[in-house]
Image (cartoon, rainbow, N blue to C red):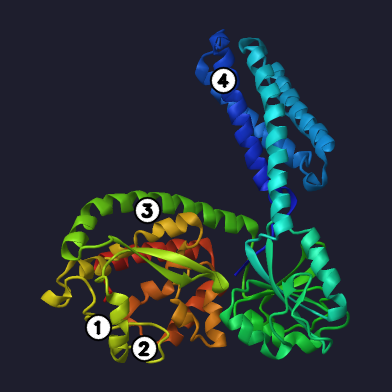
Amino acid sequence: MYSKARSGWMKHIDFIMLDQICLGLSFAVAFFLHGRDWSRTVGKQAYWKMFLVLLLLQVFVTVFFETFRNVLKRGYYEELKATFKNTALIFLMLSAYLLLAGIGDEYCKMIWILTGGIYLALTYGVRSLWKRRLFHKKKKQIGKHSLLILTTRELADTVIQRIRENNYGRFRIRGIILTDDGKKEEQIQGIPVVAEMSTVLEYIRTEWVDEIFLHLAGRQEAYQDLIAQCVKMGVTVHCNHPEMEENDFLGKRLVERMNSYTVLTYSANVITSRQAAVKRAIDILGGTVGCLITLGLLLVIGPIIYIQSPGPVFFSQERVGKNGRRFKIYKFRSMYLDAEGRKKELLKKNRNKEGLMFKVEDDPRIIGNYKGPGRGIGSFIRKTSLDEFPQFWNVLKGEMSLVGTRPPLVEEWERYSKHHRARMATIPGMTGLWQVNGRSEVTDFEKVVKWDVEYIENWSMELDFRLILQTVGVMISGKGSM
């Protein structure tokens, strides 16, 4: 599931938020320094209401006057001029509003003067520091998305250079694959040559690859099958010369800018940057509430777990996230400390014979199962899904979402076939279609993949909300737990 790069003023949302924070701090400091004069004919509350007007004016000036256009290309002097212009526009509009509303004399002018002066200095400093951070990420090629480049040896140097020059924390170039039969090389400009054209799909199957950039000198019809295979595996493909025929197997597509290139992008599903921002905001809210609930559960569940099985209350395990990222998942420990070591003994009892999932009925490793199936604290927290609550911390960190596809174990991921990889095209979630359709009762992994791909291809916020509500019902009923 591909989130379109932010465009227009939205691509500068980080600078806008920093400016808002600076404005808030500036007003608070000015009020603290000159607060004794706030009471003329209006009270303190009126100033804070006017501060909200100031925040709205800041957003209006940013969007209407495009004050962040070419912000990353501005030097220190140009940035100072731009910051002064931005500050002047905001406070001129505030003055005009107070004058037209006939309430200018009711407020202390010194507070607004101090706010403007502090805001100018603070904003200039923060913007400069933030740009230095972005340039550092550009220099180190630190990015959120793992990019694989497919091109010819003749074009490779130019492609790498252009992507690097316009990369501000978006891409981490994972490797390069040469599409011609030129001289074999181990690396180009420090980027490893990771595979040949004959092994590219196998490489994608087992490695962290979010997106592919395909750049060739001529027409690309010969690569339609490769693009279709990559899209089916959940990888987004950007083509620099989009001379492609219509093909339903290539998924959804759009024309966009990728660094300094105009590309035709293919993906299993495409969501806007606003949709991605809303989903992340809900995750942050849900993750915060969930972490607070987890702290409460810890006070109750923690001592019981420790009494029945002395040792750590929490359990962490390496899982595979979106498109092959590795991360640590957290749970309340529901099994004895030697559970991982005893797993090999139970492989024959695994209800999924392919080893793509591990499901054992009446698992003896669960805390308290020696008393009989379902009688210990381990079975209780698994049945009610309380063991999953520490994953709200993963959600808060951005490693998981409230709704998505469940992250597999590393050894399960390594056994995946190419079409199984499609379920990894989104950030893993605490719940999803699999969880509300039976959880541990489902042992057919192909069914799981079908549900996960269905979720990815038909994602909407409405679907997420529906799945969250259904999950609450499943938790209460204990349906599908083991």
Mark sitting earlier along the chain (4/2): 4
Q: Circle 4 is placed at which residue position?
A: 47
Pointer 3 local density, CA inside 10 Å: few below 14, some 14–19, many at least 20: many
The disc label shown at residue 290, or none: 3
Q: Circle 2 is placed at which residue position?
A: 352
**What whole-number distance in Å separates the C-alpha atoms at marks 1 and 4?**
64 Å
Q: Amino acid at mark 1?
A: Glu
Q: Nearer the viewer, mark 1 or mark 4?
A: 1
Mark sitting earlier along the chain (1/4): 4
Mark sitting earlier along the chain (3/4): 4
Drawn side of residue 252 relative to residue 281, left or right: right
Q: Position of residue 249 (x, y in %)?
A: 67, 84
Q: Nearer the viewer, residue 314 or 72?
A: 314
Pointer 2 local density, CA inside 10 Å: few below 14, some 14–19, many at least 20: some
Mark 4 lies on a secondary structure that is helix
Pointer 1 local density, CA inside 10 Å: few below 14, some 14–19, many at least 20: few
Confirm whether residue 16 shows in the render: yes
Pointer 4 local density, CA inside 10 Å: few below 14, some 14–19, many at least 20: some
Q: Quadrant of residue 173?
A: bottom right
Q: Position of residue 37 (x, y in %)?
A: 57, 9
